[in-house]
Image: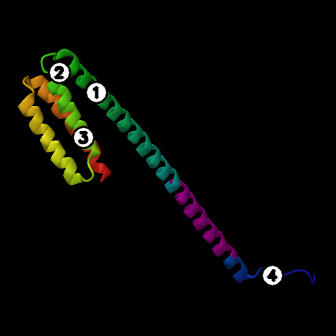
């Protein structure tokens, strides 16, 4: 009977506190895991959206190139002038700073409106120049 001990109320209390603490720890761990999963999902969605936007941009830029080639091919009378305008457009990409790019963009717009006669060709050239300008500006 020497080995028999009465339950110690303070030990039971500590066990209960430890158990409660463990439940809180488990809840915290579960919450952290859930947040990590949500963050991973958000990043994955953001990556997929970026890839999709890039593909749309590539598709659009490819269409712009086809438009420029078509302009050169089908406008025999204005072919030299259109080629000069296209050359001016690509000079935008050689700009050393944003101010120079804007200046070249405005010069190109003026050349388009002063050189090209039909509205469809003007629209296609203006759109292509805008794409080049908008692609160049973020580089600065």
Front in this rendered view, residue 55 or 94:
94
The C terminus lies in quadrant: bottom left
Please name the residue that numbered disc 3 is placed on: 91
The N terminus lies in quadrant: bottom right
Q: Which stretch did the figure color magenta?
A: 15-34
Between discs 3 and 1, the one toward the N terminus: 1
Cα separation, mark 3 vs mark 2, equals 19 Å
Q: Does the magenta stretch include residue 47?
A: no
At x 58%, y 61%, the residue is 29
Residue 27 vs residue 3: left or right? left
Between discs 2 and 1, the one toward the N terminus: 1
Tell me which corner region of the image, top left, top right, bottom left or bottom right, holds residue 94: top left
Label placed on residue 65: 1
Cα separation, mark 3 vs mark 1, equals 16 Å
Q: Is residue 27 magenta?
A: yes
Tell me whether circle 2 and circle 1 mark residues in contact (CB < 8 Å). Answer: no
Please name the residue that numbered disc 2 is placed on: 79
Q: Is residue 77 above or below residue 49?
A: above
The nearer-to-camera label among 3 and 1 is 3
Label placed on residue 6: 4
User: Residue 105, image x and y in percent?
Assistant: 17, 43
Instruction: Give SS at disc 1.
Output: helix
């Amino acid at each position: 009977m020497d080995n028999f001990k009465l339950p110690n109320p303070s030990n039971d209390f500590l066990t209960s506190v430890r158990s409660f603490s463990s439940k809180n720890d488990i809840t915290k761990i579960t919450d952290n895991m859930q947040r990590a999963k949500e963050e991973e999902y958000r990043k994955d969605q953001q990556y997929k959206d970026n890839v999709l936007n890039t593909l749309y941009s590539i598709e659009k830029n490819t269409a712009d190139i086809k438009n420029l080639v078509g302009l050169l091919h089908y406008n025999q009378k204005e072919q030299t002038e259109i080629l000069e305008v296209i050359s001016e457009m690509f000079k935008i990409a050689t700009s050393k700073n944003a101010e120079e790019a804007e200046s070249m963009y405005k010069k190109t717009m003026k050349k388009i409106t002063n050189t090209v006669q039909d509205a469809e060709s003007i629209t296609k050239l203006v759109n292509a120049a805008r794409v080049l300008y908008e692609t160049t500006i973020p580089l600065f």
